[in-house]
Image (cartoon, rainbow, N blue to C red):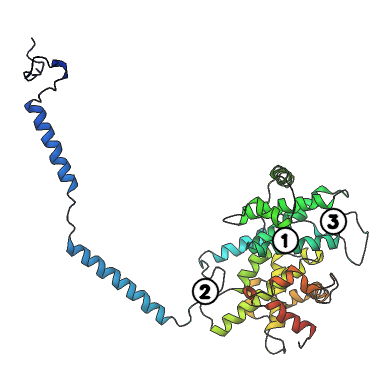
């Protein structure tokens, strides 16, 4: 027998009949020592180290001091910003100039040629496939879905941009209304995936349109749109300029000034969406569109009586447009707004989604206020 090998000793059987193979081996001393060490380690791991009470008390005191300081700072700031305003109230001042330069530089990229659109007064001027009134109906359709699904304003502007550019790329007279609806669904689906954090499902769009399309048909239309536009989708919207022009230095304003600014911002949004009906207005730069709509909102809502300056030096600095530059192009916007409230485009403008959207509380019912001012209704 080799001495290095461990010997396993079996106890003597009490009865000779018991089978030796069924007996358990006796553990040696070394094995017992190892098992004891393992049991000790388990007990030590099970015991949690007691925390130091002095350190915990110091942390609690620090947390209390920080919370008290924050409460005192909030009390000192009497002109705190209202939470009702739903936009970015704290722009980064260090990079704001660079952001504005970049926006002005890229505002002409990825835009349709609106001069190809037909005019109401001059019929059959060109062979453009989409008529004036049909485009107006699709604008209202996009606005209704944007409002019902609680999508961003940027999603609406991007949808309209993709829709106009793709139809110009087709350049054919043989477009059925069903095909246009399919294109509209695909454009809205693409824009929501670009702009929204949580884009709605395709089923929701199809249910709102009340159309029976398969997912494959919409995906094929989406593929055709993106490939025809060379995947150059994003552009600068007028609403981005409007937010930069209108919402500046909100912290330094009084409560009345804040409410006036919010009212003007909603009124400018309303005018901007009305003027999108007119292709001549859409030919202008997005920054100029935003400046014109803001000018008209301030004129009708803040300076109705003609007292005070509508366009001050601060707005000239922010927009890079003087009052004379705005007045040159303001006639197009004023005519479209008067035609809208005069039921030129439809039988009843009050039934349109564009009007109903801005009659809601979210937009301070600015559409109803502007209707009373422009039409002179006392009711």
Sequence-wise first label, 1 or 3? 3
Please name the residue that numbered disc 3 is placed on. 130
Q: CA distance from mark 2 to mark 3?
A: 42 Å
Q: CA distance from mark 2 to mark 1?
A: 28 Å
Sequence-wise first label, 2 or 3? 2
Disc 2 secondary structure class: loop
Please name the residue that numbered disc 1 is placed on. 142
Q: In what quadrant of the picture does the N terminus appear? A: top left
Q: Is residue 299 visible?
A: no
Q: Residues within 10 Å of mark 2 (few under 14, many from 20)?
A: few
Labels 2 & 1 near each other (Cβ < 8 A): no
Disc 3 secondary structure class: loop
Tell me which corner region of the image, top left, top right, bottom left or bottom right, holds residue 353: bottom right
Q: Nearer the viewer, residue 280 or 209?
A: 209
Please name the residue that numbered disc 2 is placed on. 83
- 170 is higher (above) or lower (below) than 106: above
Q: Residue at x 84, y 63 (%)?
A: 133
Labels 1 & 3 near each other (Cβ < 8 A): no
């Amino acid at each position: 027998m080799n001495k290095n090998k461990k010997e396993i000793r079996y106890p003597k059987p009490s009865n000779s009949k018991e089978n030796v193979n069924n007996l358990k081996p006796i553990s040696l001393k070394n094995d017992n020592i190892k098992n004891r060490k393992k049991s000790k380690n388990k007990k030590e791991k099970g015991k949690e180290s007691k925390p130091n009470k002095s350190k915990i008390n110091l942390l609690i005191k620090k947390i209390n001091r920080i919370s008290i300081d924050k409460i005192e700072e909030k009390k000192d700031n009497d002109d705190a910003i209202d939470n009702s305003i739903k936009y970015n109230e704290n722009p980064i001042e260090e990079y704001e100039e660079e952001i504005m330069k970049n926006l002005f530089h890229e505002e002409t990229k990825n835009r349709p040629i609106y001069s190809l659109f037909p005019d109401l007064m001059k019929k059959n001027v060109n062979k453009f496939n989409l008529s004036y009134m049909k485009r107006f109906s699709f604008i209202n359709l996009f606005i209704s879905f944007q409002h019902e699904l609680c999508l961003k304003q940027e999603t609406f502007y991007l949808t309209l941009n993709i829709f106009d550019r793709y139809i110009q790329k087709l350049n054919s007279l043989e477009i059925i209304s069903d095909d246009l609806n399919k294109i509209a669904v695909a454009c809205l689906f693409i824009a929501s995936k670009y702009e929204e954090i949580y884009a709605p499902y395709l089923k929701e769009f199809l249910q709102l349109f009340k159309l029976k399309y398969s997912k494959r048909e919409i995906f094929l239309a989406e593929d055709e749109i993106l490939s025809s536009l060379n995947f150059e989708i994003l552009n600068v919207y007028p609403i981005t300029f409007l937010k930069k022009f209108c919402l500046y230095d909100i912290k330094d304003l009084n409560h009345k000034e804040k409410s006036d600014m919010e009212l003007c911002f909603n009124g400018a949004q309303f005018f901007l969406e009305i003027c999108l009906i007119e292709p001549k207005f859409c030919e202008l730069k997005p920054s100029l569109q935003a400046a014109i709509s803001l000018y008209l909102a301030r004129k009708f809502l803040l300076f109705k009586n003609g007292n005070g300056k509508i366009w001050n030096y601060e707005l000239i600095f922010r927009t890079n447009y003087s009052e004379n530059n705005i007045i040159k192009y303001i006639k197009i916007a004023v005519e479209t707004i008067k035609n809208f409230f005069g039921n030129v485009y439809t039988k009843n403008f009050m039934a349109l989604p564009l009007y109903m959207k801005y009659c809601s509380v979210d937009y301070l019912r600015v559409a109803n206020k502007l209707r009373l001012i422009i039409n002179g209704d006392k009711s």
